[in-house]
Amino acid sequence: MSNTAERIIQASLELFAKKGFEATSIRDIALKVNINSATLYHYIRNKEDFLFSLMKNGLGESLSYAEEIALNMKTPQQQIASLIQMHVIIHGEKQLLTYVTDTEYRSLQGEHKIAIKKIRKEYEKIWTNVITLGIDEGIFNGVKDASLTAIALLEMCTGVTHWYSPNGRVPLIKISEEFVNMGLNLLGAELNGRLLTIADLELSSPPKYQNLDTNDYRELLKH
Amino acid sequence: MSNTAERIIQASLELFAKKGFEATSIRDIALKVNINSATLYHYIRNKEDFLFSLMKNGLGESLSYAEEIALNMKTPQQQIASLIQMHVIIHGEKQLLTYVTDTEYRSLQGEHKIAIKKIRKEYEKIWTNVITLGIDEGIFNGVKDASLTAIALLEMCTGVTHWYSPNGRVPLIKISEEFVNMGLNLLGAELNGRLLTIADLELSSPPKYQNLDTNDYRELLKH
DNA sequence: GTCTATAGGTAGATAGAC
DNA sequence: GTCTATCTACCTATAGAC
């Protein structure tokens, strides 16, 4: 795969994140990559299809991680903690992609919009199921409505993509741990009469999501 | 103030929310209001200035509510509970305005961008201060980093604007109460060894933010 | 307060040469 | 794989009549 393809993807993500998809023109991307705008169409079918590929790729990866966690982690506490940590780290490490994915849904059309909505729903369903299980088993005693709780937690964690900076005061791994603790608090997960924390859980450490920048971009383009 | 002005604002909010600001043309708005696109410029200076006015108005109202809460509520528990409830209800009742305000920051330019950022920071500061106070007084024992906690809570509550539906399963007032409970859990606010809930707090009830649709639109337009 | 007409520019996308 | 040239459509905004 050519270097030009990777540069197109990187430049597009930067522009889409900074200016927004609609405000970014084909010529803006071409200028940043230092190619002619007509050359872009050798790599992409059209602008909207390109956005769809980016979003599908980003969401698909998160979904497969979530499925793996739901399968491999034993207790609801470990499952929700791992989901939170994975979600936060991905939204920090792959900030441009998650930011674009989270903000440009409106620019999708027809079947593309339906397909992305479906992936989102599957992802959310995994969170809801884990929380439902935790409530039913009497582990999460601070909440009653699993759907509402899942959506609240998801929005809280997704928000990381809006404010996180790699140069910020708190490193991403620490942020992810604090978010796990806040999540466990929110759920009312207790251990021996005190609030459960991430230190009480045996999670795979360090999480394998930490280095995600070696992406395979092949599926994002038309060839 | 003419009826046309209100219809312009309503149509614009609907289009900006559905398609996005950049994807909405002056002609789209004019068509929806059933006027010529040139007539629009009798009411607005230009498209970007109009967006700024909408956002400034929306954020300014939230900020003044937050200032009132910080001033009138006595304890950090009451303050954060009221802030959460107010934020959630506003994001449900004024969904179009908050949605546009929360998603179109990128389309602002120069001084407008700076001004909106400043209001956001002031608003966030109120939340951070309340949480700091609660931590210092030993009331919020589940968190340590007030800034991180404030931003997490804010993102969680702001998310309501993305998924809330007036026709949904749970009424807005109930959602706001659940969010207060989740927020208190997250902070680790306890009472006699158990998690504090909204029922333990004496909040003004029903909240005055419930009916907000009688807006004064005068400041949003150029006259 | 609303219109017609239009200026001046940029948009996404394609044809076809090399 | 990259370019020049270009089509058609649409964009924001304004001038000026009524």
Image (cartoon, coloured by chain):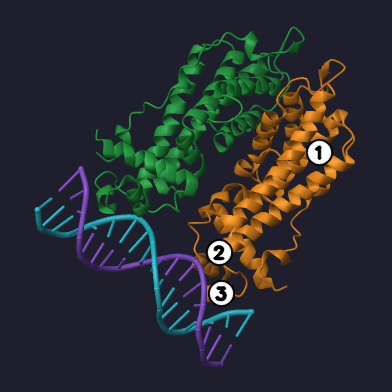
Chain colours: A green, B orange, C cyan, D purple
Residues under numbered marks 3 and 1 in contact, where contact means CB atoms less than 8 Å apart? no
Q: Which of marks 1 and 2 is nearer the N terminus?
A: 2
* The quadrant where residue B49 appears: bottom right
Q: Which mark, by number, is residue B35?
A: 3
Chain ID, mark 2: B
Chain that bears disc 1? B
Binning the other alpha carbons within 10 Å of mark 2 as few (below 14), some (14 to 19) or many (20 upward) gives: some
Residue B171: x %, y % from top left: 72, 41
Which of these two is toward me, A175 or A105? A175
Quarter holding the C terminus of chain B is: bottom right
Q: Mark 2 points at which residue?
A: B47
Q: Which amino acid does label 1 sit on?
A: Ser
Amino acid type, label 3: Ile
* CA distance separating discs 2 and 3: 16 Å
In what element is the residue under mark 2? helix
Can you give x and y, in whole percent of width and height, for residue B43 in the image?
63, 72
Judge whether residue A109 can be spotted in this image.
Answer: yes
**Vertical order, A45 against B132 (above or below):** below
- Residue A213 appears in which quarter of the rendering? top left
